[in-house]
Image (tube, rainbow, N blue to C red):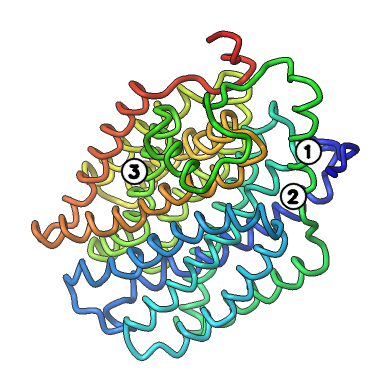
Amino acid sequence: MPDTTLALGIRENLTQFSHQLIQVLLVGFAIGMTRTVIPALAETEFGVARGSFLLLSAFVLAFGVVKAVMNFIAGRLSERIGRQRVLFWGWVIALPIPVMIWAAPNWGWIVAATVLLGVNQGLCWSMTQTAKLDITRADQRGLTMGLNEFSGYVGVALAGIITAYAAEALGARLGLLVFGMAVVVLALALTVVWVKDTLPWARAETAAHKRSAPKFPPRYPQGVPEQPSTREVFALMSWRDKRLAALSQAGLVEKFVDALVWVIFPVFLVAQGASLTEMGWIVGVYGFVWGGSQLFTGRLSDHVGRFWPNVLGMWTCGAGVAMVVLGSGALWWSFSAGIAGLGMALLYPNLSAAVADITPPAWRGSAIGIYRFWRDLGYGVGALGLGIVAHLTGALEAAFWFVALSMFASGAVLLIWGEETHPRLNPAHAL
């Protein structure tokens, strides 16, 4: 029987909420340590030939495909064995990553380490997100997702800067080894000692909905069984429910931007004469603006809704990407990166919040996992597209235009297929 005494709310569960924020910060550190030093030094440190855009993209392609699959698995698995155990095994799998980067004799080892990173991120980031949604109220979802992604992407940005300095002080390999092992061991210890499983809160919420309908009933998909199969949930998220499909495709395309920032942006900046630390700060602006702004954009959507922040975020982010190649100099690139980060802040927490709005708690973990499957598959699709475009044209600038145009088109699909999902602003009885 579900424990119906478990209260929902950030304040009511502040201790556990805070532990989950620390976890997602460490998850951000884990991925952030690969995003500045490794692409920038791919040629000199790991033997990637100059201009090998497809080979350079391979490690992000591998990461995206693996993380996408693990998101799918993590969501369903967490409804069977609990969120905390999935989080724990995600960190266990991360233990070899820093050692593999340190010992890597060639680029193949970096790709292999990134496969393990994809497993880690799929399990751990999915669980920090799902766990927070388990213990907070419907009217706090935007704020919850904003805080979650703020913590994670500030972690990504900080790790990129810290590892750039560490690489200059200790060398690329040793710097990444020391930083990476400290992050993974600390995360494992905190998971074992302080993180609680939040699945009982989700079950209590389901029981509460059965006893009495909420004041603002959500617009859940119609004609769906109480416990749908994995195949049924996948179909709903991917094509059967037009609103959920619109959110999934937007999630997939917005990851093209992250793939660009990860693979092409550092190489572009180095080619333009930026130093390793300058590059770390310019790319860091994107992460800091993205992460910091989500403190406000997530909460904003709890008041004004998810629809327009998502649509405008797609277009703003696309504009920021295009701006990078329309000017030159560290100040211009930092400003452009900031515009792209602001667009990401508008859309990133609110796409996830919209999915949570219109999926019941009984299968919300699966729905979020499948949304994250499509979203993180965008790493792979985007990295492949970037590599092909850059390879065929021989120009890094073409990759920026590919991503910008994709974002504008995807935002248009979201505008046409999507709707407002916030229960208070568009409740089910408005049908």
Q: Residue furthest left?
A: 393
Report the side of 390 relative to 210 (left or right).
left
Residue 49 place in picture, x, y as percent: 19, 79
In the rendered image, which quarter is residue 214 located in? top right
Looking at the image, how many numbered discs can be counted on the residues? 3
Q: Which residue is mark 1?
A: 10
Which is nearer the eye, 417 or 386?
417
Q: Amino acid at mark 3?
A: Val
Tell me the element at label 2.
helix
Q: Which residue is mark 2?
A: 199
Q: Amino acid at mark 2?
A: Leu
Tell me the element at label 1.
loop
Residue 201 place in picture, x, y as percent: 78, 43
Q: CA distance from mark 2 to mark 1?
A: 16 Å
Rendered view: 23 above or below 97:
above
Q: Which residue is mark 3?
A: 253
Q: Residues within 10 Å of mark 3 (few under 14, many from 20)?
A: many
